[in-house]
Amino acid sequence: MKKKQTSLKDIANELGVSATLVSYVINNREKEGRVGKEMAEKIRKTAKRLNYQPNHFARGLKNQKSRSIGLIVADISNPFFANMARIIEDEASKNNYTVIIGSSDERPEKMERVLNFLSSRQVDGFIIVPTENSQDQIRTLLADKTPFVLVDRRFDDISCNSVMTDNFLASYKAVTHLIKKKSRRMGIVTYDSDLNNHKDRLKGYVEALKNNKLRVDQQLIKRIRYNQNDNDIYKCVKSLVEDGKVDSIFFTTNTLTLKGLKAIHDLGLKISEDIEILAFDNNEVINFYNYPVTQVIQPIERICKESIAVLFDLIENSPGKISNTMFEGKLSR
Amino acid sequence: MKKKQTSLKDIANELGVSATLVSYVINNREKEGRVGKEMAEKIRKTAKRLNYQPNHFARGLKNQKSRSIGLIVADISNPFFANMARIIEDEASKNNYTVIIGSSDERPEKMERVLNFLSSRQVDGFIIVPTENSQDQIRTLLADKTPFVLVDRRFDDISCNSVMTDNFLASYKAVTHLIKKKSRRMGIVTYDSDLNNHKDRLKGYVEALKNNKLRVDQQLIKRIRYNQNDNDIYKCVKSLVEDGKVDSIFFTTNTLTLKGLKAIHDLGLKISEDIEILAFDNNEVINFYNYPVTQVIQPIERICKESIAVLFDLIENSPGKISNTMFEGKLSR
DNA sequence: ATAAATTGCTTAAACGTTAAAGCAAAATTA
DNA sequence: TAATTTTGCTTTAACGTTTAAGCAATTTAT
């Protein structure tokens, strides 16, 4: 049998006082409780001696607050999200909050399941990387007045708190940079998705070309479905290089980059000599070979810290103000 | 204001019955509660209509069970552990358990902090990847009769539940395999650590050499400290290749492999032609280039599922039996 | 026909915490 | 000196759930 932890009452009995008094001291509210100085001291000592730990359930029940938040990402085993999780967890822990993570697998039904599961655990709020087509779930949260913040992605037609990279700007700047360098004909490989982060990256590409008086050739815009097979990407790259005669390719996500680089390698092309590569996000393979790839680095830490700050503010002060924060991405070279 | 969720009492009032009755039905214990068939039906309907969700705090307070477990890993942003987390989370969720993750950063004090933090959240038990020198923390858990399972690593001098790969056997088999293939002189790069998984991998190497009548040359055993700089590994590899004249190198962890491959690449060596590589665990770089590397693949899924099964058994039945499970690793080629 | 068992429900208490209300005794004010 | 305020505490109730105990009314057994 696991031994029972000490309760307020245990301390109270030990000192022959009421539990209320102990409660005030434990919560550092002795002023409010008008607890005598000596008594406060005694209580503190006894609490330490008996190794008192507040009972989280009793507190939660009484206060209707769990001091825990739900984090919903696409897949926690994906390094990008694992990184986010780490930062958010550390930040939460500093504020004595606990994080419970769930993976949506980019499927709205799964996201809903996870939301419900975490709600049933009485989390105080959510940080959510929303999946495509999860507008309904988000609207439900809004209707229920559940505190939450979207990260990494948002929906143009839903007004709610969000924090992310300015994908349009990052993309625009990166593409412009490459054009300035030398690229005259750039292809892009992106996801066939309604998610605004993907759309903005594409928009940035298109605008940058236009503003630099380059023709936007629909042939050079390759859209890949999620869960495509790797061969699709190989075909895209091959077609861009051979038929499209591009001198550079922009891969708009980490996964696309990884598979794209593989295709380029398999096609026997030399990066920088034969072709320039622009990549959203960093990955291990780029680092490993010091590939001369221009990367857009997202400020993950800032994003996570800001989103958690917004969420805590929502939970603790519940102001009606909606904030949509966008941070600038950085170019790696 | 977030709207209040419906309680047992709400349902009870709606039907003009007592909360007790509703409780029995909600928990599918109508037999025990001797609830009439029709009433049970009515209650179920009303519960559904009002979208009743049990209050987790009240339950926890009453039952002294949170249906949540703590998972302590070295670093959740490390893909190996992120993978584990994903599997454990899915498995836990199936059983209506919640997982709270903490990173120890391979430091015993940090591990203790995380343990305390999670304990204060009333988790029912732990799955722990223990850091080096955390024996005291583990002994405290034992003394407190806290349910827990160690994964990936254990301490030879502490008797407690554990689940991991049979590191000795996996290492022994892999090294033997390479010897059988052609390797006559194998170097090993491992961590300078007391953790039994590392020690066992080294033991496996030594035993395999001995049993194949090869000399164990201390010069060929390179021990790296945690948080070494990458240059150390480069030096080790270089020394093995140039002074040691090895024809193969065994990297005993994922990280070592990654840095080792880089060194080999930088030294201009061709894997398989100039040197054979044996690696514990898989990594993205190996996959990317289809490097002809012999890998020991750990059965992560089995390990995670077993550890969670053992933990649940401990929590729900608390049998005195201690189990130390080891699964066989697989060779990739 | 009567005692015993079963059915269908209720009441009360408890889990550990917090918050409001209350109550003497001591200190301050007029 | 008497009225008022402050100090240092206690009591009570509540959060939502579960469990033991209890109590009629009905059914079954003898």
Image (cartoon, coloured by chain):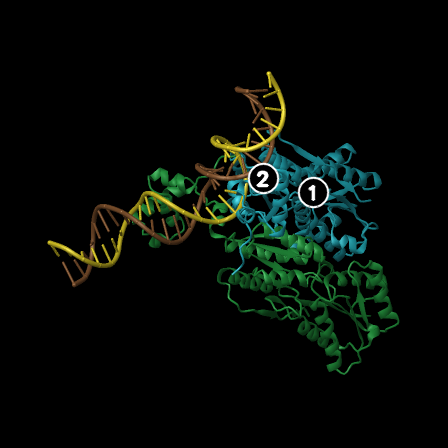
Chain colours: A green, B cyan, C brown, D yellow
Q: Circle 2 is placed at which residue position?
A: B24
| Residue A295 as seen in the image, left or right of residue A305 | right
Residue A6, relative to residue A333: is it above or below? above
The outermost residue toward the right is: A243
User: What is the x, y in percent for residue A188?
Assistant: 78, 70
Residue B22, relative to residue A65: is it above or below? above
Q: Quote the CA–CA distance across marks 1 and 2.
A: 70 Å
Tag in front: 1 or 2? 2
Dot 2: chain letter: B
Q: Residue at x 56, y 40 (%)?
A: B21
Return the residue nearer the eye: D18 or A110. Answer: D18
- Is disc 2 on the same chain as disc 1? yes
User: What is the x, y in percent for residue B182?
Assistant: 84, 41
Amino acid marked by disc 2: Tyr
Return the residue nearer the eye: B78 or B10. Answer: B10
The image quadrant where one finds the C terminus of chain A is bottom right
Residue A49, relative to residue A60: is it above or below? above
Contact, CB < 8 Å: mark 1 with mark 2? no
| Residue A263 as seen in the image, left or right of residue A302 | right
Question: How many labels sit on residues?
Answer: 2
Amino acid marked by disc 1: Gln
Determine crowd level at label 2: few under 14, some 14-19, many 20+ residues with C-alpha closer than 10 A: some
User: What is the x, y in percent for residue B241?
Assistant: 75, 49
For label 2, the SS is helix
User: What is the x, y in percent for residue B14?
Assistant: 55, 49
For label 1, the SS is helix
User: Is residue B151 at all visible to an observer of this figure?
Assistant: yes
Q: Disc number at residue B167?
A: none
User: Is residue B231 at all visible to an observer of this figure?
Assistant: no
Return the residue nearer the eye: B14 or A109. Answer: B14
Q: Circle 1 is placed at which residue position?
A: B219
